[in-house]
């Protein structure tokens, strides 16, 4: 699914997978955002690349929003494919050393992977026709990160699990659903500051970790999520 000229959704609800993954195409490489879980999703992601004639480009990097199984379970597959993986502690530590909480939650054995690089808040990556800036968004998990992709005149915000978009019939308004708040390291105070921080990044496309992509005033949507958390 093409989001804009050089950003694609490679798995997600339209592909009958639980979590979303995205790819940014730069002049000479492909950058993944989240890795999904299990071989089925991995194959769907690779097939998406084929469909958009991206298979010949090298996937050089993968940015992980957080360590939960549905976003980082395929880290070991990225390692095998020679992709450099970027993530943040404490999630990265769990990806590398085992994640009993996820084994219980998803009833699967955790296969450890390597997070090659630890992200820092505000760290920026320059590509030929895009810039990716990493932001610490702790809350949903303590090592949660998001990314602003600046490319082709757009600012797209990759949020992982913060909140999701929900169309509201009959008037087709947009509402939001806050992400899972039952994790062992969920932190409400951090989550509130992260939503606030997201609402000040002036993005025009939202690329969340589940369900639908949103085009429009992302600041307003993040502010709505912040208000929803206060009321929750
Ligand atoms: Zn999660």
Image: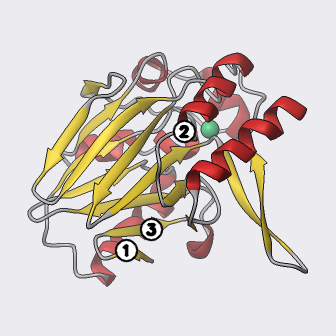
Q: Earlier in the sequence, mark 1 or mark 3?
A: 1
Q: Earlier in the sequence, mark 3 or mark 2?
A: 3
- Residue 18 in picture, x, y percent from top left: 63, 58
Taking depth in this image into account, of 102 and 88 the one nearest to the observer is: 88
Crowd around label 1: few <14 · some 14–19 · many ≥20 (10 Å): some
Q: Is mark 3 within 8 Å of ligand 1?
A: no
Q: Earlier in the sequence, mark 2 or mark 1?
A: 1
Q: CA distance from mark 2 to mark 1?
A: 21 Å
Q: Quadrant of ligand 1?
A: top right
Q: Secondary structure at mark 1?
A: strand
Q: Is mark 1 within 8 Å of ligand 1?
A: no
Q: Residue at x 59, y 75 (%)?
A: 14
Tell me the quarter of the image containing the C terminus: top right
Contact? badges 3 and 2 (CB < 8 Å): no
Which mark is in front, 1 or 3?
1
Name the residue tied to disc 2.
198
Crowd around label 2: few <14 · some 14–19 · many ≥20 (10 Å): many
On the image, which quarter does residue 49 sit in?
bottom left
- Residue 69 in picture, x, y percent from top left: 56, 39
Q: Left of 103 or right of it: where is 137? A: left
Q: CA distance from mark 3 to mark 2?
A: 21 Å
Which mark is in front, 3 or 2?
2
Taking depth in this image into account, of 206 and 80 the one nearest to the observer is: 206
Identify the disc placed on residue 9: 3
Q: Secondary structure at mark 3?
A: strand
């Amino acid at each position: 699914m093409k989001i804009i000229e050089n950003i694609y959704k490679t798995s997600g609800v339209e592909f009958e997978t639980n979590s979303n993954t995205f790819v940014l195409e730069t002049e000479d490489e492909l950058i993944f955002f989240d890795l999904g879980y299990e071989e089925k999703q991995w194959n769907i992601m690779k097939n998406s690349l084929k469909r958009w004639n991206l298979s010949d480009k090298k996937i050089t990097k993968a940015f992980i929003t957080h360590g939960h199984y549905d976003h980082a379970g395929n880290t070991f597959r990225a390692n095998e494919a020679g992709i450099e993986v970027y993530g943040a502690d404490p999630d990265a530590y769990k990806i590398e050393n085992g994640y009993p909480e996820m084994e219980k939650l998803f009833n699967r054995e955790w296969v450890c992977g390597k997070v090659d690089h630890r992200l820092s808040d505000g760290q920026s990556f320059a590509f030929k026709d895009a810039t990716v800036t990493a932001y610490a968004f702790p809350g949903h998990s303590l090592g949660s990160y998001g990314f602003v992709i600046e490319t082709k005149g757009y600012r797209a915000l990759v949020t992982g699990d913060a909140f999701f978009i929900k169309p509201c019939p009959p008037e087709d308004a947009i509402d939001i659903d806050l992400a899972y708040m039952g994790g062992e390291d969920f932190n409400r105070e951090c989550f509130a500051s992260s939503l606030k921080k997201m609402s000040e990044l002036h993005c025009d496309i939202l690329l969340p970790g589940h369900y639908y992509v949103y085009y429009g005033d992302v600041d307003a949507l993040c502010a709505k999520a912040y208000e929803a958390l206060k009321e929750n």
